[in-house]
Image (cartoon, rainbow, N blue to C red):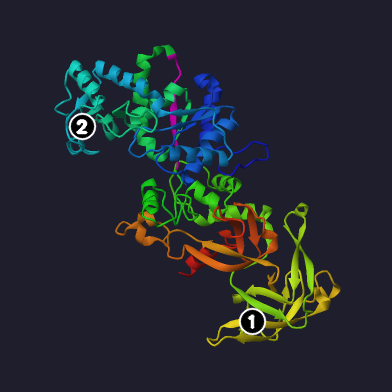
Amino acid sequence: MSEENIVHEDGKKSLNFIESTIEKDLAEGVNNNRIQTRFPPEPNGYLHIGHAKAICLDFGIAREYGGVCNLRFDDTNPIKEDTEYVDSIMQDIQWLGYKWGNVYYASDYFQQLWDYAIDLIKAGKAYIDEQTSEQIAQQKGTPTQSGVNSPFRDRDVEENLALFNKMNTGEIAEGQMVLRAKIDMANPNMHFRDPIIYRVIHTPHHRTGKAWKAYPMYDFAHGQSDYFEGVTHSLCTLEFEVHRPLYDWFVDELKRFHPEDGTYRPRQYEFNRLNLTYTVMSKRKLLLLVKEGLVSGWDDPRMPTICGFRRRGYTPESIHKFINKIGYTKYDGIIDYALLEHSIREDLNAGAKRVSAVLDPVKLILTNYPEGKTEMMEAVNNPEDESAGVHEIAFSRELYIEREDFMEDAPRKFFRMTPGQEVRLKNAYIVKCTAAKKDEAGNVVEIYAEYDPLTKSGMPESNRKVKGTLHWVSAAHCLTAEVRLYDRLFSVENPGEEKDTDFRDLLNPDSLKVLTGCKIEKELENARPLEHFQFQRLGYFNVDTDSKPGKLIFNRTVSLKDSWSKLKNKD
């Protein structure tokens, strides 16, 4: 939970500022030493990697301090919300390894929020405003200039109550009127200048149907929902810091109407949000990418959504590692995508099975190897884990190697296959290239080599030093597969900061390359969707959910090394 989970010599773990605050609250007996958090997503899209940071904090704090974390859907805007998003959010939380104490919805509290709004009206602290949204915004003033009172601010209580009731009967058109809290139009905090707390929406709600026409605003519903549920620590990202005084004002006013709840009150604390290079985190922008077909869907492996990372081959453990590395602070910044990739490399290096795959195959014929002969070579499943064991891979006269591993007129430091030069075929023999055959266009179609039968892996002669080792598959014993090479979604580091450019124009045209006719070893015949592998010398890959028996499809999760940093340094 801390920025690096550092443990000092005295055995004490370094705490982030939120953990320190919670330990202080526990020491002082705040809220009867209870710890209750909540994760409150709006079901208007799929969760992204930024939400994963909040999930790990909300659920992690509850787990660490013996509390409970509830899942609450902030479903106060039926125009954008759908049960599809509710289901996906639940799946993502569970995939990350967390369980909620209870599932709540802001819509569970619509009646309580309505009753509270009526209490505010009766107390002279809320009124119906019939101005347009533009007029209201203009009258709010600026941070250095006081706002102007609405001409409807001093409406009498009975008229406000009658109009508020009409807002919910369907008699009032959308945008015709709103309910505003009556606070202070001269307050230096703009959020206190008579904020809107209810508006009219005629779109049916995904849970309550047509029962409500007047819906509470986020600032009004959020703190009150925390209060109704018994939340002790309401953890939000930094953009809500300026909203906190209003959060407290609404909670304090609500407590005036419910003094029986004693000293209990929720408290809001803010932490930095996650901003990642080469991507955007705006749900609005992500939705545009999906709707305009610029990606294949919310779970497109290039998307920063949790389901996108899952489909690409990221693991829950890698997400946790990444979030532990970046930590929680009070300062916003932007995190290099390479750090996220480093986390998945660490995880898959330790756990992924090593297999052979040739993405751009060219045939290699060993002219002195007996025709019809097949040997089974032993391949280590994972050199980082002895308990992972070994598997066998077929070796024969005709093999496939990577086209880029051969060069006819090679420079001096080209240590792969070239005429007259020896290379090792991994787990097999040392071979020497003798010739190559080309088609009419000059493309190499076959490579010829001779193998040394005394250099089989494990034999004394196999220790003979050669400068290159190539991966391969047997032509007669391999499978054909499709491989999708995914890369960063955008071609610039901070696409969200390019003010004069449409973010869609910054998409990386090479973010997806689909390769057909790839050759993979038969060991992968029964590979299951989302199963991880290291394709030797190529990177980490997993089986895509589109994959079917007889039509294997693999996604590149990440390359073996960070090539983007090298390119960036060249620039």
Above or below, 331 against 495 in this view is: above
Earlier-in-chain disc, 2 versus 1 = 2
Give the residue displayed 46% in from the left and 23% down from the top: 229
Rendering coords of residue 203 (x, y %) = 30, 34
Q: Is residue 166 left or right of residue 13?
A: left
Hey, what amino acid is under mark 2?
Ala
Amino acid, disc 1 = Glu
Badge 2 element: loop
How many circles with numbers are drawn on the protein?
A: 2
Q: Quadrant of residue 398?
A: bottom right
Residue 476, position as x, y percentages in the image = 70, 71
- Crowdedness of circle 2 by 10 Å Cα count: few (<14), some, many (20+)? few
Task: Name the mark on residue 403.
Answer: none
Instruction: Read off the residue under disc 1.
Output: 446
**Quadrant in which the N terminus appears:** top right
Under circle 1, the secondary element is strand
* Range of residues picked out in magenta: 261-272
